[in-house]
């Protein structure tokens, strides 16, 4: 039995109900090969179900049904896995001729059910059993590479889930930034201890002045050193007072002088840590996959790099430094107070439990508020990051008021949340200090009473020192109270930063090879891809492009043609099936090396605010002037660059620089040319320019694609006149594939598109002729 | 079409004003289809980062006819002609001293002494229009797109330096 279960492929442990079934199937000689443990019954209610697959049939074990149901593969036709909304079904045309749903499930097991549906259909088509079983095994392997706790996909099967790992590691991660400065920090702590000690001296001296220097004091002193000084001046009060003042002055000078050095060192370490942290986050952000940026707005990423790292830095320093100092101060005060008078000490410590209680109470309230404020603020900055760059759209649709309203709304949300927090944050320290000061009232009341009564050991000086110490006591206590406050915001920031620092970067296999030069054969083998598991953007796409072919990819918007390119560029890795270039799986290539072989020209040319030269040379840093000029020649860009007053030194994105969209597009082509790519991808490169510029760009493209495998996504079929093969993509499928002539003869979708566009062009021409 | 790089066998002479005449060598004239091109305007391709190399010669239509890689590749007389022409075309005064600075509504107004005399100008955006290189070289652009340079800001007098550095 155990052996049977070991051999069985499954996504989860089988429910107890299904176990006897496995055994009986094995006894019947048709043993179960793989099992899908589902989560929904046929009635649409949640419940554990099991669908077992053998070489001949599928057996369903559903808690909502009596017994089991068996479905023989030979009875089934057209097996389909259909994804609906929040649930999905497996169905097939049964012998009766009716389509019957035989398994219902949520998206959790959808990938396996897709594989299972293919398994059945392929077996029915008479494909090799071993091959199909191998495909199923791969599907299971993939399904298992998600975190069992939270369901996030893992880097590789068996990897540790980042979200579920222990918080100790978070501390470890952050300490990485503090550790290089250990020496300075230890030195700072040492300095702090010194200043703390200095701060403890003055109250003792003032107490001494009241008791032993002023007339009417008790005349006795509990501090031997000060007593010795008094004796040195033969008890002459004025001279002793002067000596005491000089003593006070020198402690102050030491205390604050060292304070300056310490603050400077702290600030330096602080800035260094935040710089290092920011560098790391930025670097990491560069290597995050496109998938991450689809989910996270760029505004919030920017916020994390600039804002959160600073919050975190200040907190880390507070923990390592001030917390230590204040702790020592607290201990020092208590020790001195106890040595002066244990009874009074106990009295002045009375408010402590209350302070601790209040601190915990408030922190619980504040914690969620801080996170909400952060989210509100991200929304505010998102509005800015969205609308300011798109100001043209805003203006052209007179959306100024609307976007202002949206901004004001988000800003108000933020304000309200801040105000809510403000109430708590401001009340909290005040209440705490109120409690602490009440401690001094106790000292006045009880201690003062004892002084009046003349109880032994109580003097006016003692009370004065005590009050001073008690008020100093207030400092570290409020610090610790406020620590929870900065701890909360730091925790919120940490989460955001770790989200980036620990996000999985683009997947690079350990033994990746750097490709040399591609001949340019591209193969897609059964490639399927979906962004969110609900709708497949590409569905079982298979095609081959031979070296040197110029391939036009046409199709309606949303048909998946851009996704084809995104997958080929390896912007997304989570697809099933294989993409091969020159016969090698592209996942085995080193990412940077692979991408540098592909010249990718986007629809919207994106330029950095840098010189034209640097923008072109971006693809190959360190290019020579003549290489860049040659690239600009090929791209038909050199001419207009010459005419710029600053030539190649023209700064883009600056006031007064007249670089049009078409010119930018030619710069981006120059950028691709410079790289000497072995394959080219044009993603609607001429979609946004006028016909004359299109002609220039077309000319540039023609020069460029000579002998290179080229993919061109195009709406305008005129762009594709050089194409010797057309792929028509529709709804995630390749519906037509062949030379333009073949497809015209086919009279399919391509034929229709050509008809529509030539008709449009014709009527455009006629209209123009009429006008002239 | 290959780009023609001017060599010592080609001659550049003054034509009219700052325009020049290019007489091509036998090999080059075959390439270009004509032996003599008049009315060419020398222009720097890298006026900021590399003003003495890669000088393009544009015809009246703004079309590039030839490129000078560097002065050392052409004969001295031609180089002198080109330098003279460029000196006429590119007028970039050197700021010697910043006399005063005023600020109104975020616009800076500098009064400076340059190698061409004293002038006052506005700077609209101090972040974009004042570039200080690490070497001490400074490029300034005024509100009307005129350019000025300071060869080494560290060599300015104390007063000028203080005025400059406050905005960088």
Image (tube, rainbow, N blue to C red):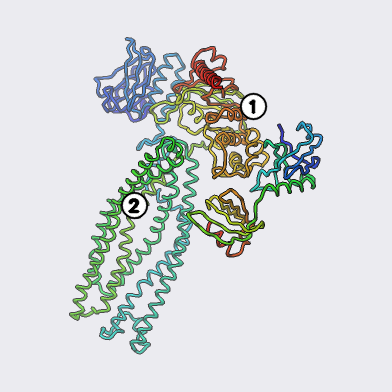
Q: Give the class, few, some or many, for how many residues have Cα within 10 Å of label 1's Cα (few <14, many ≥20).
A: few
Q: Is residue A42 above or below residue A235?
A: above
Expressed as whole percent of the image width and height from the top left, the position of residue A504 reads: 45, 40
- Answer with mark 1 or mark 2, whichever residue precedes in sequence: 2
Total count of labels:
2
The C terminus of chain A: image quadrant: top right
Distance CA(mark 1)–CA(mark 2): 60 Å
Expressed as whole percent of the image width and height from the top left, the position of residue A349 reads: 25, 66
Q: Secondary structure at mark 2?
A: helix
For residue A55, side relative to residue A443 (left or right): right
Same subunit, labels 1 and 2: the answer reads: yes
Q: Which residue is mark 2?
A: A488
For residue A373, side relative to residue A125 (left or right): left
Q: Which mark is residue A694?
A: none
Q: Is residue A341 above or below residue A531?
A: below
Q: Is residue A200 above or below residue A631?
A: below
Q: What residue appears at the point 37 percent right and 62 percent down from the top-left corner?
A: A324
The N terminus of chain A: image quadrant: top left
Pointer 1 indicates a residue of which chain? A
Q: Which residue is mark 1?
A: A706
């Amino acid at each position: 039995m155990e052996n049977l279960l070991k051999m069985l492929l499954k996504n989860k442990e089988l429910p107890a109900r299904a176990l006897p079934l496995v055994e009986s199937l094995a006894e019947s000689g048709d043993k179960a090969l793989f099992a899908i443990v589902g989560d929904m019954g046929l009635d649409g209610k949640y419940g554990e179900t099991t669908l077992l697959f053998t070489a001949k049939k599928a057996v369903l074990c559903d808690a909502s049904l009596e017994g089991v149901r068996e479905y023989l593969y030979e009875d089934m036709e057209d097996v389909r896995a259909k994804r609906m909304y929040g649930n999905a079904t497996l169905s097939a045309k049964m012998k009766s001729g009716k389509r019957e749903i035989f398994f219902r499930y949520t998206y959790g097991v959808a990938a396996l059910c897709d594989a299972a549906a293919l398994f059945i259909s392929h077996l029915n088509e008479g494909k090799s059993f071993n091959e199909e079983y191998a495909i199923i095994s791969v599907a299971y392997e993939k399904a298992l590479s998600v975190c069992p706790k939270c369901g996030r996909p893992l880097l590789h099967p068996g990897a540790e889930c980042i979200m579920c790992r222990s918080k100790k590691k978070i501390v470890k991660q952050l300490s990485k930034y503090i550790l290089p400065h250990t020496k300075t920090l230890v030195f700072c702590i040492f300095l702090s201890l010194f200043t703390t000690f200095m701060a403890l001296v003055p109250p003792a001296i003032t107490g001494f002045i009241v008791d032993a220097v002023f007339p009417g004091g008790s005349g006795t002193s509990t501090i031997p050193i000060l007593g010795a000084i008094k004796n040195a001046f033969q008890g002459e009060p004025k001279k002793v007072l002067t000596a005491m003042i000089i003593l006070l002055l020198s402690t102050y000078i030491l205390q604050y002088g060292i304070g300056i050095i310490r603050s400077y060192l702290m600030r330096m370490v602080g800035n260094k840590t935040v710089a290092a942290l920011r560098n790391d986050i930025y670097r990491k952000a560069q290597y995050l996959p496109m998938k991450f940026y689809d989910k996270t707005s760029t505004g919030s990423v920017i916020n994390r790099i600039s804002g959160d790292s600073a919050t975190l830095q200040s907190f880390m320093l507070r923990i390592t430094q001030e917390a230590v100092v204040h702790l020592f101060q607290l201990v020092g005060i208590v020790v001195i107070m106890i040595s002066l008078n244990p009874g009074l000490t106990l009295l002045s410590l009375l408010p402590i439990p209350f302070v601790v209680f209040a601190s915990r109470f408030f922190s619980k309230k504040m914690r969620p508020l801080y996170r909400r404020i952060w989210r509100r603020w991200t929304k505010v900055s998102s509005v800015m990051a969205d609308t300011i760059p798109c100001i043209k759209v805003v203006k052209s649709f007179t959306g100024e008021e609307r976007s202002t309203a949206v901004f004001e709304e988000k800003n108000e949300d933020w304000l309200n949340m801040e105000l809510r927090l403000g109430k708590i944050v401001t009340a909290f320290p005040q209440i705490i200090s109120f409690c602490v000061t009440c401690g001094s009232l106790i000292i006045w009341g009880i201690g003062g009473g004892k002084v009046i009564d003349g109880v032994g050991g109580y003097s006016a000086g003692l009370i004065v020192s005590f009050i001073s110490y008690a008020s100093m006591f207030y400092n570290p206590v409020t610090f610790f109270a406020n620590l929870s406050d900065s701890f909360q915001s730091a925790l919120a920031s940490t989460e955001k930063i770790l989200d980036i620092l620990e996000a999985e970067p683009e997947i690079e296999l350990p033994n990746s090879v750097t490709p040399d030069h591609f001949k340019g054969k591209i193969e897609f083998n059964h490639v399927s891809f979906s962004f969110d598991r609900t709708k497949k953007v590409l569905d079982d796409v298979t095609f081959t492009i031979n070296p040197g072919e110029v391939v036009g990819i046409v199709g309606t918007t949303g048909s998946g043609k851009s996704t084809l390119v995104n997958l080929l560029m390896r912007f997304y890795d989570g697809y099933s099936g294989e993409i091969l270039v020159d016969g090698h799986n592209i996942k085995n290539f080193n990412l940077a090396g692979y991408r540098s072989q592909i010249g990718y020209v986007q629809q919207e040319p994106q330029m950095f605010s840098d010189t034209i030269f640097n923008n072109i040379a971006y693809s190959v840093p360190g290019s020579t002037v003549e290489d860049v000029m040659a690239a600009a020649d090929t791209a038909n860009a050199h001419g207009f660059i010459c005419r710029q007053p600053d030539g190649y030194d023209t700064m883009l994105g600056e006031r007064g620089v007249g670089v049009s969209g078409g010119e930018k597009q030619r710069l981006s082509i120059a950028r691709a040319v410079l790289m000497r790519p072995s394959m080219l991808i044009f993603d609607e490169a001429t979609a946004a320019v006028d016909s004359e510029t299109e002609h220039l760009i077309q000319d540039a493209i023609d020069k460029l694609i000579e002998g290179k495998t080229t993919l061109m996504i195009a709406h305008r079929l005129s762009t594709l006149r050089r194409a010797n093969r057309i792929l028509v993509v529709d709804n995630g499928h390749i519906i037509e594939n062949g030379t333009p002539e073949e497809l015209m003869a086919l009279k399919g979708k391509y034929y229709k598109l050509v008809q529509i566009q030539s008709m449009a062009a014709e009527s455009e021409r006629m209209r123009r002729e009429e006008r002239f | 079409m290959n780009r023609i790089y001017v060599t010592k066998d080609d001659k550049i002479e003054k034509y009219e004003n700052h325009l020049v005449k290019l007489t091509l060598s036998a090999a080059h004239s075959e390439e270009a289809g004509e032996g003599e091109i008049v009315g060419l305007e020398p222009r720097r391709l890298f006026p900021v980062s590399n003003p003495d190399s890669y000088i393009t010669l544009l015809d009246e239509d703004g079309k590039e006819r030839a490129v000078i890689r560097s002065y050392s590749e052409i004969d001295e007389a031609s180089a002198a002609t080109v330098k003279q022409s460029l000196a006429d075309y590119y007028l970039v005064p050197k700021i010697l001293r910043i006399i005063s600075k005023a600020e109104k509504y975020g616009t800076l107004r500098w009064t400076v002494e340059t190698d061409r005399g004293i002038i006052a100008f506005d700077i609209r955006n101090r972040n974009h229009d004042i570039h200080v290189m690490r070497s001490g070289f400074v490029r300034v652009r005024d509100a009307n797109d005129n350019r000025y340079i300071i060869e080494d800001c560290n060599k300015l007098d104390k007063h000028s330096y203080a005025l400059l550095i406050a905005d960088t």
